[in-house]
Image: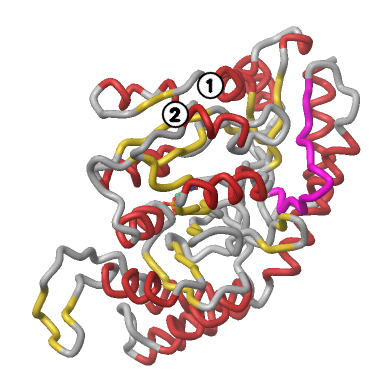
Amino acid sequence: MPQNTIPVNAPLVPDEAKTYVLDCLGSGWISSAGKYLAQFEQEFAAYVNQKHAIAVCNGTVSLHLILAALGIGPGDEVIVPAQTIISCLDAVLYTGATPVIVDVEPDIYTLDPAHLEKALSPRTKAIMPVHIFGHSADMDPINAFAGAHGLFVVEDAAEAHGARYKKRICGSLGTAASFSFYANKLITTGEGGMVVTNDDALAARMRSMKDLCHLPGQRFHHAEVGFNYRMTNMQAALGCAQLLHAEEFLKRKQRMGRRYTEGLAGLRGIVTPVVRDWAVSSYWMYGIRVTPEAGMTRDEFRRRLLERGVDTRDFFWSLSEQPLLATHPSRTLPCPVSERLAREGCYLPSGLALTGEEIERVMDAVRAVIG
Ligand SMILES: Cc1ncc(COP(=O)(O)O)c(C=O)c1O
């Protein structure tokens, strides 16, 4: 890798973070109790306009926690989009339920509601739309379908902090939602996650399950199997500092997204992201497709960009083609769109610390490679 390579992600750690984390260390409250946890949960709930927010240790277990608390288990089916991280499939498999993998929309890469009817069975219990790359899934038809068939809607908003669907913030659009605070997310706690919901009973159940299911009023007595999915107060301190800057970070990402889209318009074989008229994208990562018109494969394109000091990453490998499916039960519908995306897609440097000058360097490199 050449020196001065522009990384795909570099986080922005605001000044308040050091103050809060040092305060936390000084207080001795370094595990999973303390004022920053309570504050982070309260402020995050307000941020996503939900009654309850429960902090957990990452955005994979948060998906599992929601499914488990909804009572999803062996014999049930959960519909998941094919173009997403393995965490979505894993979370369903942890419960013993069967994932049903469906294709995504060709322009915005989110779960295609047109496939829901074919995916439905008497065992279907939930749909897990994923707001991929910070662009919301088309939630109205998904929620209408779920309502008509008595299904839960579990939003995976891991990549979509601050994104909007028809003016409503992602994470407020289903039964419950899951967020990740991994280092490349708009708000990071290093590792971390959050579940949010407006449902009081579900929230109480998730709060109990994430902390070993102590019986109410009888600590260390347990009638159910629980999990230790707790976040630490230190992580929450970092989260509180990040949350102060959520709007500013979102604007930064959106400026980056617009600048790339303008600068890369019309390049042969490069497809830039579409934003539907009802969506406000948070441009979590700026994902492009390298089509055959580019005259090279996506892998060749990535290699040539790296030679010019620009790092990139592949899109997720389609869930429909994961080797894991050979040994685990699933139902997979045809997923040609997701499988093509997995081969053509890559994302450009998109971190919050990316400067305007670096964006120009990335675009110059793309133009030079495409020729
Ligand atoms: C769509 C999606 N869901 C879930 C996760 C899992 O989050 P975590 O890495 O915090 O476990 C990620 C992680 O990046 C993700 O992109």
Place residue 130 in its image quadrant: top right
In front: 50, or 70?
70
- How crowded pointer 2 is (Cα within 10 Å; few <14, some 14-19, many 20+) is rated as many
Quarter placement of the C terminus: top right
Residue 205 place in picture, x, y as percent: 31, 71
Amino acid beneath label 1: Cys
Secondary structure beneath disc 2? helix
Quarter placement of the N terminus: top right
Residue, disc 2: 319
Residue 251 place in picture, x, y as percent: 79, 61
Would residue 344 be counted in the magenta stretch? no
Is 133 on the left-hand or right-hand side of 31? right
- How crowded pointer 1 is (Cα within 10 Å; few <14, some 14-19, many 20+) is rated as some
Amino acid beneath label 2: Leu
Is 254 on the left-hand or right-hand side of 148? right
Could one spot residue 17 in this view of the protein? Answer: no
Contact? badges 1 and 2 (CB < 8 Å): yes
Residue, disc 1: 335
Residue 344 place in picture, x, y as percent: 64, 20
The magenta segment? 270-283
Residue 303 place in picture, x, y as percent: 62, 20
Q: Residue at x 82, y 40 (%)?
A: 260
In front: 256, or 15?
256
Could one spot residue 348 in this view of the protein? Answer: yes
